[in-house]
Structure formats: C-alpha cells, structure tokens
Amino acid sequence: MAKKLNGTVIVTYRCNARCTMCNRYKAPSLPEEEISIETIKKLPPMYFTNITGGEPFIRQDLKDIVRELYKKSDRIVISTNGFFTDRIIDLCKEFPNVGIRISIEGLEDTNNEIRGLPDGFNRGYSTLKKLVEMKHPDVGFGMTVQDKNAPDLVALYKKSEELGMEFATASLHNSFYFVEAKNIIHDRLMVAQNFEDLINELLKSNSPKKWFRAYFNHGLINYIFGQKRLLNCDMSFDTFFIDPYGDVMPCNGTKDKEVMGNLNTQTWDELWNSSQADEVRAKVRCCDRNCWMIGSVSPAMKKYIWKPTLWVIKHKFLRLFKKKKYSMYENKIVRDYRDGKVTKEDLDKLSTCDVCATINDGLSKASKEILKNQSGEDIVNKDIESQGYTKTEKNNS
Ligand code: SF4
Ligand code: SF4
C-alpha cells in the first residue's frame, strides 16, 4: 500500500481579513479557477490534511471538499479566521471529528489591529465558544507572534486553557504565499522573553503534548534569531501543499512559487515521480530559509522524534529535580545578542526579510488580469456581499 502523506490543501486565495503580516487579501484567486472536487479526488492517501486559504470558509462548497477529503485522509484540520461562524458550526455538525484552528492574534484590541476584521476578536472568540458549547472535540487558537502581540501570548494561552482548547503558535514568515517580504521581528529579546514564559507554562503542565509544544516554541526563538532549523526540512519528500490552481508545491515558505507538477492535468503518480518534482526536492535539500511553521515542523518532529524527546526529558528533569526553569539564554545566539557579540543588523541580515524583493504572489494569469482593474479587497468584498455577508472594512493601515 502507498505510504500516506501529510498534505495541505489551499482551497482559495480569497480572504476577507486584512492582516498586517500577510497581503494575500490583495491577491485573491478567481473562484472559477479554484481547485475542484475532481482534482481533490486525485490526491493520494494522507495521514493528515490541513485545509487552508486565504479564508477557506469563503468557499460555499467547503463541506463537499471535506467530505471528499475524508475518503482519503485520517485527520483533517481547517485553519480559519473564524468570521463565517454559521458555516463553521454547520460544517462541524456534519463532521464532528474535524479540527478547527481559529487565528486570534492577541487580546481584543491587538487582534483587531493585526487582523483588520471589524469586531474580529469577538467574532472569532464567539465562534470558538459556540464550538466548545456544542462539545466539538478538536478546537483551538492559532496565533502569529510578532512585536505587537507578543505581550498577549501567555494571557491568550491561559484563555485557551480555560476553554479547554489547543493553542498553536507561529511567528512572522515571508513568502509568495503570504505575498510578503518585509515581515521581521524588531524587538527579538522581548518576543523571546514571551516565548520563554509560554515554554515554562507548557513545561509545567502534565500533558506530554504540551511539552512537545514547548519544544516547538523553543524552535521559534531559534527561528526569530535567524538560526539554522533545529530539525531537517523534508518538505516535498513526504509532505506537500497544493494551491487553488492544482499546482503541487513543497511548502508555503519559499520566496517564489516552486511547482512539482499540476494535479488538474496530471495524475498524482505522474507528478510525484516526475523529474520536475525531483528538481524541487533538490532545491529543498539546500534551502536556507529555515522556516519554523507547524506545517513543516510537525512532520519533522515525528520523523526525528528522538531530538525533541531528549530536549523534553532534559527540561522536565531540570524542572522537577533541580527546580530550574527553561531560559531563552540556553540559545547561544540569544546570549551573544545580549552580550553585544552580534548586532540587530547582523540578525536582520539572517532573516528572510528583504524590503527590496519583488514578490511573486503565485496567482494565475487570469487572476492577475482581473487585478488590473480593481483591488483584491474590492473583488472579495463584492464576492462576500453576493454571498449575503457584510463587506469587510479595512480598519488598519
Ligand atoms: S493571514 Fe490568513 S486571514 Fe490574514 S490576510 Fe492572510 S490569508 Fe487572510
Ligand atoms: S525551509 Fe523548508 S518549509 Fe521553508 S522554504 Fe525551505 S523547504 Fe520550504
């Protein structure tokens, strides 16, 4: 039997939010070009599937997509901004095992400033509460930690605890997928200090899953200081992303879109075993972007399990028997920065932030064409108005 893969399906590039760290809302896909059920039927067996966007619930046929994906995937998690509450609840009623991760970017004011959705926090939070009330088993927050929201990190984690939810973190990345090249953490020590506090909360718990989350957050400190990934990146070997146009890609972290093949026109076996796919794999082998996003780290943590396990054992031991908490200064680069051996400018150079970069948004010709006459925001506003929703006002700059 074929080996099961880890897949992410980007069902749309349309998005109704206006996040400060992602310009995807300015570069939507055309609905008629977005991945069809026929193409989804051609995907391989998967042990895990993440459905993402843009905002996936903008698609009115999302339930059909999930139904089809359940025929080939053991577990499905949908990442959403939580705006389309009724659609989320409705889908969860039909699929009681589906995971839902709602991005909440901080406490109320911070979230609304970063996400740019009117009343975004209350909307996302009330969607989460409704899911908890209906006892949906797999619900969680997702937070992209940055200078603006780092001080809210532990408070949000505690809120997720109160509600009995998962709490997932990320930090700023630049890529064609985010249509962004200027994301960067400025006050690294402050952000790392908040990660350190979260790591200690996670290590304090009795849940092994949280101890491994602590390791993931330790990797985020390493990432924001521009260091080599703690674990190899094996994207495109047993993990893939597929975009709204049916293009299969290694990941969502590359500067430009890297295509292994197209599932609209090829079979899975053709594209996965093609020389084009091998060329992309060769690029992955020497990729120096050092992303630390759950999509590429979670499979690596499973594959190289001994490394996070040793880290967890060491830190649980230190905590229990030596009363010693985790410190961000365990990372040499953090000590070097504190001691003035490296400067902020040195660290900025190690990041993927490139203010002069030309950004490839990965859009098709037809999607680019329509952007010549109107903005992505106008296109999506008209789109969601035609679906019976109030358009999204931009409330951040
Ligand atoms: S981060 Fe997600 S919700 Fe925010 S603009 Fe990008 S796609 Fe939309
Ligand atoms: S480090 Fe891995 S996930 Fe990041 S761009 Fe390179 S191949 Fe993709």
Image (cartoon, rainbow, N blue to C red):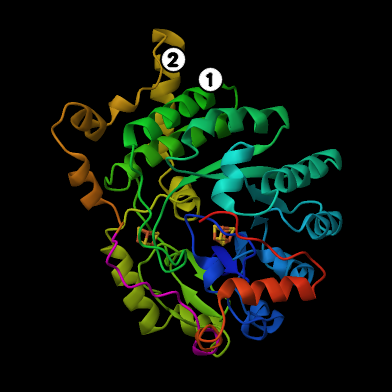
Q: Residue at x 54, y 89 (%)?
A: 366
Mark drawn on residue 204? 1
Q: Observer-nearest residue: 311 or 93?
A: 93
Classify residue 12 as left or right of residue 203: right
Q: Quadrant of residue 12?
A: bottom right
- Inter-mark Cα distance, 2 to 1: 8 Å
Judged from the image, the secondary structure of the residue bearing numbered disc 1 is helix
Give the residues drawn in magenta, as a range: 354-367
Q: Quadrant of ligand 1?
A: bottom right
* Residue 241 image position (x, y, % from top left): 51, 68
Q: Does 95 lie within the magenta span?
A: no
Residue 137 appears in the rendering: no
Q: Earlier in the sequence, mark 2 or mark 1?
A: 1
* Residue 219 image position (x, y, % from top left): 38, 40
Q: Does 358 lie within the magenta span?
A: yes
Q: Observer-nearest residue: 40 or 363?
A: 363
Q: Quadrant of residue 7?
A: bottom right
Q: Which residue is mark 2?
A: 319
Judged from the image, the secondary structure of the residue bearing numbered disc 2 is helix
Residues at discs 2 and 1 in contact (Cβ within 8 Å): yes
Q: Residue at x 46, y 77 (%)?
A: 362
Specify the amino acid type for callout 2.
Answer: Arg
> In the figure, 212 relative to 22: above or below?
above
Residue 70 appears in the rendering: yes
> In the figure, 345 relative to 5: above or below?
above
